[in-house]
Image (cartoon, rainbow, N blue to C red):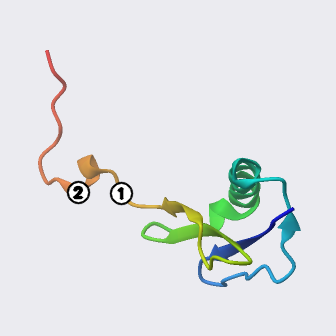
Amino acid sequence: MPRYYFNVHDNLGLIDDEGVELPDLDVAVREAVRMAGSLLKDSGHQLPLGSTWALEVADDSNPAIFRIDVQVRPASAMLTSEPQRSAA
């Protein structure tokens, strides 16, 4: 069974040195989504406006297979100087 590593990229940068054996990539994707949700639930309130956060998944032969990216940024409506009008 392949071993997958779940590395967090933020201000602290948590590197997974142990990894976990999972049957295949589909299971690794589901585990990454579950893990990202759990981590963001526990500490997402600490992400200030303008910050980025990522969970990157690797295996023994690939330093990065996929990643989940989160950006905390102002909505485009907040960036305009004129108020948005609703469609009539």
Q: Nearer the viewer, residue 69 or 86?
A: 69
Q: Residue 46: image x %, image y %?
A: 63, 68
The answer to whether the residues at label 1 and label 2 have Cβ atoms under 8 Å apart is: yes
Q: Which label's residue is closer to the chain start, 1 or 2?
A: 1
Q: Which quarter of the rendering shows the N terminus?
A: bottom right
Residue 47 visible in the picture: no
For badge 1, the amino acid type reads Pro
Q: Nearer the viewer, residue 26 or 46?
A: 26
Please give the name of the residue rendered at 78% of the width and 79% of the height, measured from the top-left corner.
16
Compared to 87, does 30 lie above or below? below
Q: CA distance from mark 1 to mark 2?
A: 7 Å
Q: Quadrant of residue 17?
A: bottom right
Residue at left 68%, top 52%? 29
- SS at badge 2: helix
In the foreground, 7 or 50: 7
Q: Is residue 75 left or right of residue 48?
A: left
Does any portion of residue 28 appear in the rendered image?
A: yes
> Residue 23 in the image: x percent, y percent?
83, 53
Q: Where is mark 1, residue-wise?
A: 74
Residue 54 in percent (x, y) is at: 58, 68
